[in-house]
Amino acid sequence: MSVEQTPAREFTFHPCDHEAIAALTYAEAGILLPSSKAPLIYSRLARRVRARGMTSFGAYVALLEDDAAERTRAIDALTTNHTSFFREGHHFEHFLSDVWPTLASRLASGGSCRVWSAACSSGEEPYTLAMAILGRNRGAAARLAKKDFRMLATDLSSEILATARSGRYAADTVRSIPADLRESWLDRSEDGTMTMCAEIRPLVTFRALNLLEDWPMRQLFDAIFCRNVMIYFDDTTKARLQTRLADQLAPGGMLYIGHSERLDAAVADRFTCVGRTTFRKIGR
Ligand SMILES: C[S@@+](CC[C@H](N)C(=O)[O-])C[C@H]1O[C@@H](n2cnc3c(N)ncnc32)[C@H](O)[C@@H]1O
């Protein structure tokens, strides 16, 4: 009979440490970390425990109580930033066929267009939208930049936003971009990485924003992509966030949510479902 052995851990990590870290992450970011996430907490925070010269999670938890910068780093480390170019491509197809024509003609006649990628991670989502809008023509980026078009992209994690702003991705990461768009909008560096070109990057404004905190934006958005972040939240947080997203959308504006996310009953009657996880705010 073989006896399975748990590999020895470098640091002690007790259930009370897990509880303290989960409470902090919930309070600051709304992210739930149930007991099934203990291995994730250990693996993501062990390097922080080591970097701070601690010998146990208990000591690190005590440090977190007094050190706001370390709390930010810990929450950064605990966020899941998985994303990809053209993820859930039906949303971009819908935007292009059903939403963009009206917005483009509004821009052409001197009007404005506001789009928000909320919880944009490393930037693949807003850059995908920009490429989808522009097609293959680099000149189109300069023309759009002259219009009253703004694409805001926000995330809680400053670390991941640094990647987003750089627009620099591993060759593997950009494989999901159709070849013609990849050739049009990405430049290859000597080290093999690919960078979103200088024409497209200024079209996206990246900002740090915790979706649970106050939002500084005054304008209403024509479309909000808020995808694959609410899965980490409980029902109360989801309902509150969706109510605020609805408030922040112009009448007739679009809300795109992640494939496993649902609209809460608190806001369902403010939207019409017009496609898979695709909702139009009622009103004109
Ligand atoms: C899985 S990624 C989703 C990225 C992209 N929207 C997509 O669908 O591919 C989730 C992102 O949500 C961010 N996030 C988690 N909690 C947040 C909060 N309270 N406020 C803002 N962003 C948050 C994380 O930092 C992470 O980058």
Image: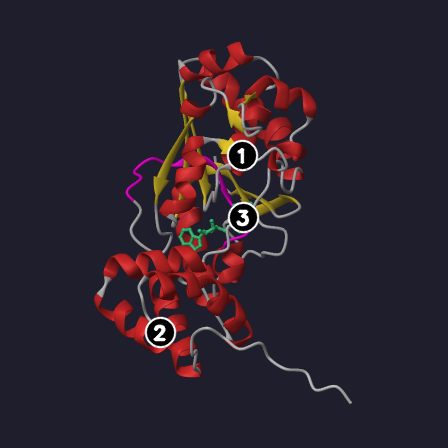
Q: Residues within 10 Å of mark 3 (few under 14, many from 20)?
A: many
226 drawn magenta: yes
Circles 1, 2 touching at the beta carbon (< 8 Å): no
Residue at position x 62%, y 24% in the image:
182
Q: Residue at x 50, y 65 (%)?
A: 43
- The secondary element bearing badge 2 is classed as loop
- Residue furthest to the right in view is 1
Marking on residue 55: 2
Q: Which residue is mark 3?
A: 227
Near-viewer residue (155 or 116)? 155
Q: Position of residue 269 (x, y in %)?
A: 52, 53
Residue 152 disc label: none
Residue 116 shown in magenta: no
**Amino acid found under the numbered disc labelled 3:** Arg
Counting from the top left corner in percent of width and height, residue 23 is at 37, 73
Q: Residue at x 38, y 35 (%)?
A: 206
Residue 22 seen in the current view: yes
Local SS, label 1: strand
